[in-house]
Structure formats: C-alpha cells, structure tokens
Amino acid sequence: MPSSPSFDAVILGAGAAGLFCAAQAGQRGLKVLLIDHAVRVAEKIRISGGGRCNFTNQGLDLRAPQRHFVGANPQFARAALTRYTPAHFTQLLQRHGVAFHEKHKGQLFCDRSAEDVIALLLAECAAGGVQRWQPCAVKNVGFLPSSAGGESAGSYQIDTDRGPVQARSLVVATGGLSIPQIGASDLGYRLARQFGLPVVAQRPGLVPLTFDAATWAPWNALAGVALPVAISTGAGKKGRTTFHEDLLFTHRGLSGPAVLQISSYWQPGTPLSIDLAPGVALQDALRQAKARGSRKLLANELATWLPARLADAWAAQSPDWQRPICEASDRALSRLGEQLSHWQITPSGTEGYKKAEVTLGGVDTAALSQQTLEAKAQPGLYFIGEVVDVTGWLGGYNFQWAWASAAACAQAL
Ligand code: FDA
C-alpha cells in the first residue's frame, strides 16, 4: 500500500495566523501543507475592519505589549509580540505595494480593500511553495510516538476527506468560535484536549452587550445615538479597567468601540459604570446654570454636553428633572449630575458569537512555550493565533497577535 504524503508541517486553518505561518515556514525551505474546511480562504480578514482590514496597531507598546491583551496570563504574548512587531508587518505591506493609512489611535487600515492583505498572504505562500487543500475536512488526528519505531514514528497522522497525510509538526491555527457561519469551529480546542492540554473556558469578546427588556425600556428609543464616554468595569485600583471611546445605543443594548472594548473585561452579573460626559464636572456646571437664573428646561441645558435625544430621555426619568433649571432643587441637580457621570447599569448578556469579533479563553498558555508556541508536553504540536488564550483589544491587536505568534512558530518548525 502506498504510504500517505508526508510534510515537514501540516497547518490546520488558512486564516490570518495559518497563512502567515505557512508562508514563513515554506520560505525557510520546509514542505508545508495548509488545510482549511471553508470554501474561501481567510474569510475573517475579508470582513474585518469594515472590508478594509485593520491589520495592526502602531500604538502597540513594545515595552509592555501585553497591556493591550486579555487572558489568564497576558505576559505570555510578550515574547512573540516584541520579536515580530507592527513595523515588520507594515514593511511587508510596503514591499507588496499595499497602501494603508492610520485611522484612529494607531489603527492601520488598507486604503483599498482587505483583499490586498489576502493577496499578499497568498503570494507569500506561493513564494514558499505551500500546498493548500481547501475545502478539506479534517476527520481525525493521531500521533505515532518515536518509541513506535518505523518510518512514521514521531509524526502526526492527519486523516482528511482528501485522504491521509503525515507530518513531523502539526500547527493548529483554527481560530476561535466567533462567526460560525463563515467557518469557525471548536476543532482547535478539541485537539488541545485530545493531547492533554488544558483549555481556558471560552466566551464572546469584543461584543455588543444586551439588557433585559425592563432595564432597557427607557433607552430603547435611543437606537443610533452615539457619544464619547469613559466606560469602566471591575472594582479596586488594580481590578478596574476603563476605556475612553465612543458608545452606541442599539435596540437591544449598547455597542460601539467603548462597549466592545469593555466587553472583554466585563464579568456576567457585574455592573458597568459609564461617564456620559467625560471631562465635564456636570454637578458644578448644572449648579452654575441655576445660579445664573437659567430658565432653560433641564433637558435643553443637558443638550450642551449630551446628544439631545439622550438628554430628553434622561430628564424624563424623574419629575424633578422636567422643569426649568432655576426651579430645580440643588439636590435634584446633584443627583442628575452624579447619575450621568456614574451611570451604573448591569448587562444581562452579550450578542454572542454571531456578533463577537473574538473569542476569549482558549488553549491555556501555561501549556505552551512562549518562544515557539509549541506544546510543552507534546513535541511537534503548535497552537497559534486566536485559538490560544490571548485576546487583543479592538484596533488591530488581534491580527498583530496572529502575525507575531505565526512568525514565532514558523521559526521553530
Ligand atoms: P481565523 O479565524 O482568521 O482563521 C481560522 C481558520 O481556521 C478559518 O479559515 C477557518 O475556516 C479554519 N477552520 C476552523 N475550523 C476548522 C476545521 N474544523 N477544519 C479546518 N479548518 C478550520 N482583528 C483585528 O486585529 N482587526 C480587525 O479589523 C478585525 N476585525 C474583525 C471583524 C470581524 C467581523 C471579526 C469576526 C473579527 C475581526 N478581527 C479583527 C479579529 C480577527 O479576525 C481574528 O482575531 C483573526 O482572524 C484570528 O486569526 P486566526 O488565524 O487565529 O483565526
């Protein structure tokens, strides 16, 4: 019987991390096979950044890159992120003539289309002689220990619907659970468990937050209102996380960059604290307006600092606030200012994986080498990209982790 085709490395998942790792390993002279079950390559790159792919963030703090990442041990990501930096990736784009620009807080986007990043990755794979099987389902993965003896000893056996293959190294780059309709699956977590690696429980991250109907009733009509806020979660100086970004009201709850960012830190059952007019001492400002004898309705005065629809909805919450400022009691004004600066509201949940940009949790970093992403207890098995318990902030950090973890792995294969 002919033996199955043999590779130096088989990489599962032709997304950001898998494509980049395959290209780099191929260009080092390795014989590489890249397998993906989806019909189209790199679907998440295609839909990312509104179709323009926010491929990195040049604000990544290279002295402490882990501060832009969430996970049981964000420090883990440091080694890879400091070795393959945003500048390395932008140099690669420049070599391919891909034009890009900075949009907001260091976020770099393609001028034209996310397709430019996909074309670049495919060209890099071609330069490395990478073979790609797609669509191709993975049916089973096994490992023949060195002690087994024979030609295939110490190799991974991958059974696919295009037949079996074997490889000295197996790289799992199957991503997280977000957006199942374009190919997300739990294969990476299942393989980790199969080989005895611990997996941190997953949940949706960078995701809109929802509220129960009664809590949301007063704000339901505000869908579409957006404003800059300071949003916080957690308690104590160390446990508290705050983002200064835009918030968006939706029919079911809150979204916008502020909420997506905080969602990765929010724990179910705990409240969010939102300053709806950051940088404004609202209590003082309202008292001063009263001292001036302003006859404006409170809602109209609030519209100086807040979108008018939000100011109206807020003032409607209490009869004390539905009057001219000069007639409002000091107590009512203080309560209003305090509540707008520290709006406490407890989400009932999230919009889930169908809307989440990323998956929190994943393969436990304690079981992986931070230099190479190889499983400490399973030689030749690697996990890279989002399948690992390393999740970046919104703004290009997740792709940067995909590139950096892929580069670290490719050097070690
Ligand atoms: P990725 O998900 O890219 O790739 C995994 C691959 O594995 C897929 O091709 C999948 O088909 C394949 N696969 C899964 N299961 C398989 C199986 N059983 N068998 C075979 N193949 C399998 N990040 C960022 O930095 N900037 C941005 O602008 C955005 N924007 C954005 C928008 C939206 C809508 C989403 C959902 C996500 C983003 N992200 C983002 C996050 C970013 O897309 C994500 O972190 C990376 O794509 C992760 O790269 P990976 O290669 O690890 O997984």
Image (tube, rainbow, N blue to C red):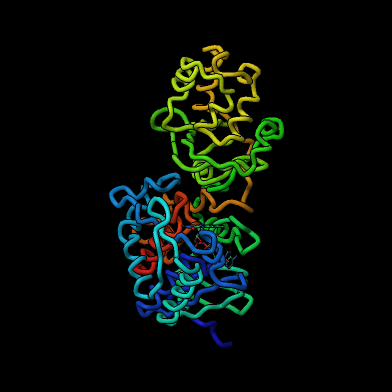
Q: Quadrant of residue 256?
A: top right
Count of marks overlaid on the render: 0
Name the residue rendered at 50%, 68% in the picture: 113
- Residue 114 seen: yes
Residue 292, position as x, y percentages in the image: 46, 17
Name the residue rendered at 71%, 34% in the picture: 213
Residue 325 vs residue 66: left or right?
right
Q: Is residue 307 above or below residue 356?
A: above
Q: Is residue 122 above or below residue 307?
A: below
Q: Is residue 180 above or below residue 336?
A: below
In the foreground, 148 or 284: 284
Q: Is residue 120 above or below residue 321?
A: below
Residue 64, position as x, y percentages in the image: 31, 47
Residue 14, position as x, y percentages in the image: 52, 70
The residue furthest left is 63
Name the residue rendered at 61%, 70% in the picture: 38
- For the N terminus, the quadrant is bottom right
In the foreground, 304 or 284: 304
- For the C terminus, the quadrant is bottom left
In the foreground, 5 or 408: 408
In the foreground, 343 or 400: 343
Residue 324, position as x, y percentages in the image: 59, 19
Q: Quadrant of residue 407?
A: bottom left
The residue furthest bottom is 2
Name the residue rendered at 52%, 78% in the picture: 132
- Residue 12 seen: no
Residue 258 vs residue 80: left or right?
right
